[in-house]
Image (tube, rainbow, N blue to C red):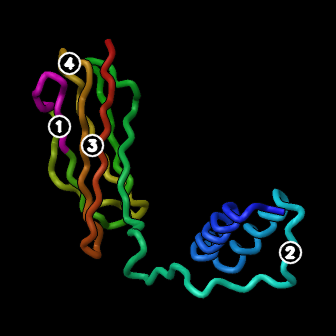
Amino acid sequence: MANDSNKGCVRYLGAAFGGLLGAAGVAWYMRRKWAFNPDEAAPARVEPATQGIVLKPAQLASVFSVSLHAEPEPLVRNQPVTVRAKAAPGALCTLTARYSTGYTPNSLDTEQQKADAEGVCEWAWEIGTTGSYVDVTVEAQNTAGETANDEVRFKIVD
């Protein structure tokens, strides 16, 4: 038989799993518990948890996001680069870039762009720096007014 000090811990963990996972969590936990305590009798029925976690739609995390990709990668000094941002279709995207030297690319047009039907915005410029990397940031706002951003440090090679 399991000793009394383990029973309190088992009850606490059972309640925790039940609160997080509902009746299925309790059933799973009880099967695991009996596998480690075979002398303890199994109840005929596992009662469902009385409390659980319920997320309302307003509490769910937003699915709006934006991501950056560059071609070629790594970036090659004195060669053109194309940076693409992937967001929601119709999102407004703004790109900023700063080399490790502290300067911004001279040939980069940072005007705000509207994402196409696939959610893609694209910027191109020539890598003209003695720096070793460029930090690129995109900020996006979807048609519902939600915002998202992504920042990537791209390595520059000769």
Residue type indicated by callout 1: Leu
Report the Cα–Cα distance between label 2 and label 1.
69 Å
**Does residue 138 sit above or below 69 in this rendering?**
below
Q: Name the residue under label 3.
A: 123
| Structural crowding at the residue carrying mark 3, measured as other residues with C-alpha within 10 Å and reported as few (<14), some (14–19) or many (≥20) | some
Residue 64 position, x and y percent, is 37, 65
Q: Name the residue under label 2.
A: 42
Q: How many dots with numbers?
A: 4
Q: Closer to the camera, 75 or 45? A: 45
Q: Closer to the camera, 55 or 135? A: 55
Main SS, magenta residues: loop
**Does residue 21 sit above or below 39 in this rendering?**
below
| Structural crowding at the residue carrying mark 4, measured as other residues with C-alpha within 10 Å and reported as few (<14), some (14–19) or many (≥20) | some
Mark 4 or mark 2, which has the lower sequence index? 2
Mark 1 or mark 3, which has the lower sequence index? 1
Q: Closer to the camera, 110 or 30? A: 30
Left or right: residue 141 compared with residue 15: left
Report the Cα–Cα distance between label 3 and label 4.
20 Å
Mark 3 or mark 4, which has the lower sequence index? 3
Q: Is residue 101 magenta?
A: yes
Residue type indicated by callout 2: Ala
Looking at the rendered structure, the secondary structure element under dot 2 is loop
Span of residues in magenta: 96-106
Residue type indicated by callout 4: Gly
Mark 3 or mark 2, which has the lower sequence index? 2
